[in-house]
Amino acid sequence: MNILILNYEFPPLGGGAATATKHLLEEFSGKEDSNIDLITSSASGYDEEQFSQNIRIYKLNVGKKELHYWTQKEILSYSLQAIKLIKKLVRSKKYDLCHAFFGVPCGAIAYLFRKKIPYIVSLRGSDVPGYNKRFSIHYIFLTPLIKRIWKRSKAVIANSLGLKELALKSSPKQEISIIYNGIDADKFKPGLRNSGKINILTVSRLIRRKGVRYLIEAIPLVLKKDKNIKLTIVGGGNQEQELQGLVKELSISDYVDFKAYVNREKINKIYSDSDVFVLPSLNEGMSNTILEAMASGLPIISTNTSGGLELIRENGILVPMEDSESIANAILRIINDKELRAYMGKKSREMVEEKMPWKNMAEKYLEVYKKC
């Protein structure tokens, strides 16, 4: 079985879809009955990497400026180069299937080659109309194309029930299945919490959609009642300087630590040293960072987005979007009740151990590949 995978994001570029793609390749690595080519983007110049004996990665030079923020120019550059490369590859290879992460642009690229290669589409978030306010105008023009891409595909797969439901608003008759993200429960484990300050953690791209501003604005409200805290913000993005300025403006620099980008091989230590995880996102599919925090045995505070609604049960607290006061109250409730904190952390760990290893995700995609 020869598979072509398209995803313009791949670590260190991008977020959840990049991580999911990397783990998918790791699970398929060494499978003698599967040969995979991934076409993705490079953080620098063009590169080709032999990921494993049966997997090759083509990294296109898109002139990337920031690791976690994509411009229209970069997306267009990836698309044009990917089309050119596929034309070259199909002269010497016969692909059984193309797996496109994101309906746009990767699904659109797969659609162009539909007569030669059948394709499936993984919905990840902003590629679904209505998901991201930043693309409101774009959705008006892109929705007819997106619906056509879905209709011609062999399968459309969302990474959460909420994302599926959002997609069905644009195309009610479209058949959409769900395959959740996974998590490496051996890499991310509960640690011994320090007996000093309560460590509050968020791991996120620093872009408007992630809502980190509202977490920062919650900290002064928490400090009025408890000064034994520290907020660690891991991630980079186009809002980084703005958010650092907000911290100074609120006079809470002593309580907030910006760590920018942290190599994914080292980030597990930061999770295990933390006590509470907060993701104040304005929209989310299935957050890998929430899953990592859950595997690390942390109580979760999440906004009531689609991914949060599916992941938060007895293991955390859901709060409204854009509501700093609710975030502050949730933080105070958890940090002031040690038994509740331990119970929620235990439930987080149990959920990922039982239901969400990456192996499950890979096996379900393999079933889809064979069926298609």
Image (tube, rainbow, N blue to C red):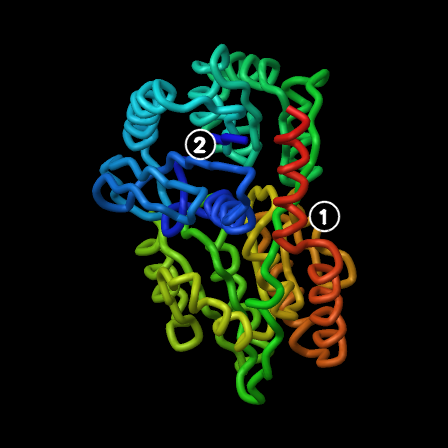
Q: Where is residue 87 in the image (x, y as percent from the top left)?
A: 34, 18
Looking at numbered disc 1 in the image, what kind of residue is underneath it? Glu
Image quarter where the N terminus lies is: top right
**44 left or right of 295 in image:** left
| As drawn, 236 above or below 255 | above
Looking at numbered disc 2 in the image, what kind of residue is underneath it? Leu
**Helix, strand or loop at mark 1:** helix
Gap in angstroms between the C-alphas marked 1 and 2: 27 Å
Residue, x 38% and y 34% (percent of image)? 39
Circle nearer the N terminus (1, 2): 2
Circle 2 is placed at which residue position? 6
Q: Which residue lies furthest to the front in this view?
A: 32
**61 left or right of 90 in image:** left
Q: Position of residue 344 (x, y in %)?
A: 73, 69
Q: 14 and 255: which one is in front? A: 14
| As drawn, 3 above or below 358 | above
Q: Quadrant of residue 40?
A: top left
CB under 8 Å between discs 1 and 2:
no
Q: Which of marks 1 and 2 is in front?
A: 2
Q: Quadrant of residue 368?
A: top right
Q: Quadrant of residue 151?
A: top right
**Helix, strand or loop at mark 2:** strand
Q: Where is residue 360 in the image (x, y as percent from the top left)?
A: 67, 49
Residue 138 seen = no
Residue, x 53% and y 70% (percent of image)? 271
Q: 210 and 44: which one is in front? A: 44
Q: Residues within 10 Å of mark 2 (few under 14, many from 20)?
A: many
Residue, x 55% and y 36% (percent of image)? 124
Image quarter where the C terminus lies is: top right
Residue, x 31% and y 25% (percent of image)? 85
Residue 356 seen = yes
Circle 1 is placed at which residue position? 310
